[in-house]
Image: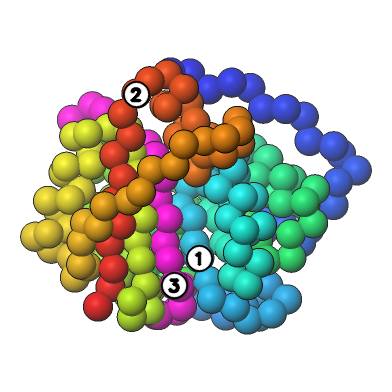
Amino acid sequence: MGRRSLRKIDPALDLSRHLRSLDDLPALLDVAKNLFNHPAPLEIEVGSGKGLFMATASGEYPQHNFLGIEVVQKYARFAAAKLAKLDRTNAVMIHGDAMRLFREMLPSGCAVAVHVYFPDPWWKKRHKKRRVMNVDFLRDVVRTLEPNGSLHFWTDVEEYFLTTLELIAANIELQGPIAVEVNDPETDMDYQTHFERRMRQHGLDVFRAEFRKE
Ligand SMILES: C[S@@+](CC[C@H](N)C(=O)[O-])C[C@H]1O[C@@H](n2cnc3c(N)ncnc32)[C@H](O)[C@@H]1O
């Protein structure tokens, strides 16, 4: 399924409060101080794409801070533009590699939730090592979560889903999988992410799981 082209971003829109580059941030992040106006429970989304989750969740939970990281610059900008238009003070996009952010820059126990929705499946056998949901990344997620913090993982690829569940059961200190309730969307924006909308509108399955750190 190919991606549609992105709508143009209004050149007058100021993205400075909503778009940061990983390369310009301190090596060890103080998330509240370096990225937000105020400290608040932190939720991190890995691979935000066009930013539907970031826009919706930051509006629904104004008492939380939301940090999205996206490796493709045009998507990071697009998602940031959405947040800027909505004037969200509790949501920021970082352009950069989530692996590096989690491995090197995030302090331990800084997040209440990590969200990974529809990560690239890397279908070919020789490319599977590029998958985001690998042992090293998942160990970094556990380190980054505070006790009782949660990991949310959704995908349309059953094999990726099952492989990840096995990998977590065998190697990662997380409780789960906990089943996730599915809503009946009332509007076209009433989906967790753009990919969820696309899959469900094409009648394709979505596999969802939540895990908790003890
Ligand atoms: C299949 S898309 C899903 C986008 C969005 N989560 C959704 O559900 O609509 C996966 C996204 O993850 C991003 N991505 C892949 N590897 C990444 C990495 N290492 N760090 C940050 N983003 C990454 C891709 O650029 C892409 O935008």
Element at label 2: loop
Element at label 1: strand
- For the residue carrying disc 3, how many other residues have a C-alpha within 10 Å: few (<14), some (14-19), or many (20+)? many
Q: Residue at x 23, y 42 (%)?
A: 161
- Label 1 close to label 3 by CB (< 8 Å): yes
Left or right, 125 with reference to 77: left
Element at label 3: strand
**Where does the N terminus fall, quadrant-wise?**
top left
Q: Quadrant of residue 5?
A: top right
Magenta residues?
106-126
Label 2 vs label 1: CA separation? 28 Å
- For the residue carrying disc 2, how many other residues have a C-alpha within 10 Å: few (<14), some (14-19), or many (20+)? few
Q: Residue at x 28, y 68 (%)?
A: 212
Q: Amino acid at mark 1?
A: Glu
Question: Which mark, residue 43?
Answer: 1
Label 3 vs label 2: CA separation? 30 Å
**Where does the C terminus fall, quadrant-wise?**
bottom left
Label 1 vs label 3: CA separation? 6 Å
**Residue labelled with disc 2:** 204
